[in-house]
Every structure is written in C-alpha cells, then in structure tokens.
Image (tube, rainbow, N blue to C red):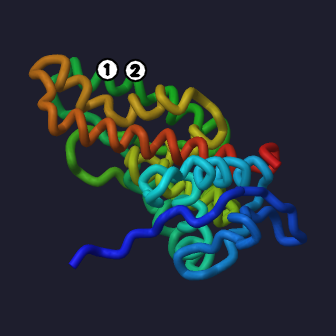
Amino acid sequence: MSGWVARRFWAAVTVVTEAAGHAVLLDARAVRTPAKRPLTLPTRAMAEAVAAEWAAVDDLIDPRLMPVTRAANAAIDKVAPQFDEVAALVAAYGGSDLLCYRADEPAELASAQAEAWDPLLDWAAATYGARLASGRGIAPVVQPPQAVARLAAEVAACTPFQLAALHDLVALSGSLVLGLAATRRARDAGALWQLSRFDEDWQAARWGRDDEAAAAEAAKRQGFLAADEFWRLSSPSAA
C-alpha cells in the first residue's frame, strides 16, 4: 500500500498581520504546525519567506524543500514548550566547545588550530566577558564557571525562534562560540562553518576526502547556513 502524500490544494498564498504576529494563508486557510498550532511568525520577513516556500510547491508538498517552514514549526512545537531544556542543552556546549580542544600532535596542526580558533575565543571574551580555556588532547578542559554562565545567559535571552536557529548553529558546528558568532555577524556564516571543519579540512588536504564524507559535510553545511538565515529572519530588524 502506498503512503499518503500531501498535495497542493490552494491557489493563492498571502501573508496577513495579526495581533500576535504574522500568519500565512493558503487561500483562506491559515497554515498550522504539525501539532496543529497556529503558525504565527514573529517578523514579516519570516512570514514572506514561509509564504514563498508554499507558493513554490508545484504538486507534492516536500518539507525538505521548505527549511524556513520546518524551522518555524520546530520553534513553535518543540522549542517553545520546553524552552528551558533546549536552552540548557545549547548552553552546555560552552563547557566542551570544539574550539577549546587542540591536537596533541602533530605540532603543525596544533599551531594551525590556534591561529584559526584563538581569534574566536578572543572575540567571545571581548563580547561576553567569557574567556574559555583551551587544552591539548582528549582530556576534559575545565572551563571557568563565570565564563560558562555568561554564555548561558546569552542563550537564555533568545526568543523560541532564535533558540531554534541557535540550536542548529551550535549542534552542527559543535561550538557555542561559533554559533553565537554567527548570530552577532562576527564573521560570514560560511567562514564560521569552515572553522568548525578545520580538522577535517586539514586531514583532507593531506589524505583526500571520500565522496560519502563530502556529501555528508555538504548537507550539514547547508543546514548551518539555513539556521543562520532563520536567525536573521527571527530578528526584530527583519520585521
């Protein structure tokens, strides 16, 4: 038996502004989340992006082609109802940030990591007063509690939509510092992503990269860039 698939049933897609935010209408029917909650969006720009995704549907509805809609659904159905838990999960990366773990050897790699990553740790210290320590090898690096707390406070200050974006930025890169740097536009999102792949790129330059690994990395990079764009659409300046 073939599975049920959703097909386009609407002729027009419009954006309307309501007291609670912005909604997308398919003809006269408001879009809802998978949990049947109203898809109420915080900025007009996000609503327009969601509307563009629904307008682009030709026949079958494919959520994989609708990253803004997917992220908005996650913000409403998953992040908002358990905000504190998600914020704690994201903030925990500050205690084990990718940028803080350097290679034991070769020395050339450790030196290259320091050159690439130390400026971002310096940025976090200057921006948040959060100086994270770095170490070599796999032994846990104990971070200053005050630094971790200051980064956690920044995470907790997010809206549910911003937290949905930050979650993906951090989880995909393995670094709270890189995720926060993306939200502050400290560097281009593509450049920040490459910093998260520094070790892999260093190894690939010497030993090559197989097609399967390259495909997986490309998918993660696309997810990182989509999360960066969702953060931008979530910000008041996008209203």
* 3D distance between C-alphas at marks 1 and 2: 5 Å
Work out whether 105 lies above or below 6. Answer: above
Q: Residue farthest to the right?
A: 19
Which residue shows up at 48% across the image and 65% down it? 7
Front-lying residue, 171 or 110:
171
Residue type (three-letter) at the residue carrying disc 1: Ala
Please say if the residues under marks 1 and 2 sit with CB atoms less than 8 Å apart: yes
Work out whether 90 lies above or below 52. Answer: below
Q: Which mark is residue 176?
A: none
Q: Give the structural element (helix, strand or loop) at label 2.
A: helix
Residue type (three-letter) at the residue carrying disc 2: Glu
Q: How many marks?
A: 2
Work out whether 180 lies above or below 191. Answer: below
Work out whether 171 lies above or below 5. Answer: above
Front-lying residue, 231 or 23:
23
Q: Residue farthest to the left?
A: 207
The answer to whether any part of residue 146 appears in the image is no
Lateral position of residue 216 relative to residue 177, left or right: left
Give how far across and how far down residue 192 sits, in percent: 47, 32
Lateral position of residue 222 relative to residue 239, left or right: left
Residue occupied by mark 1: 112
Q: Callout 1: 10 Å neighbours few (<14), some, many (20+)?
A: some
Which residue shows up at 50% across the image and 57% down it? 167
- Quadrant holding the N terminus: bottom left
Q: Give the structural element (helix, strand or loop) at label 1.
A: helix
Give how far across and how far down residue 125 sits, in percent: 59, 39
Which quadrant of the structure image shows residue 47? bottom right
Q: Which mark is residue 115?
A: 2
Give how far across and how far down residue 183 sits, in percent: 62, 43
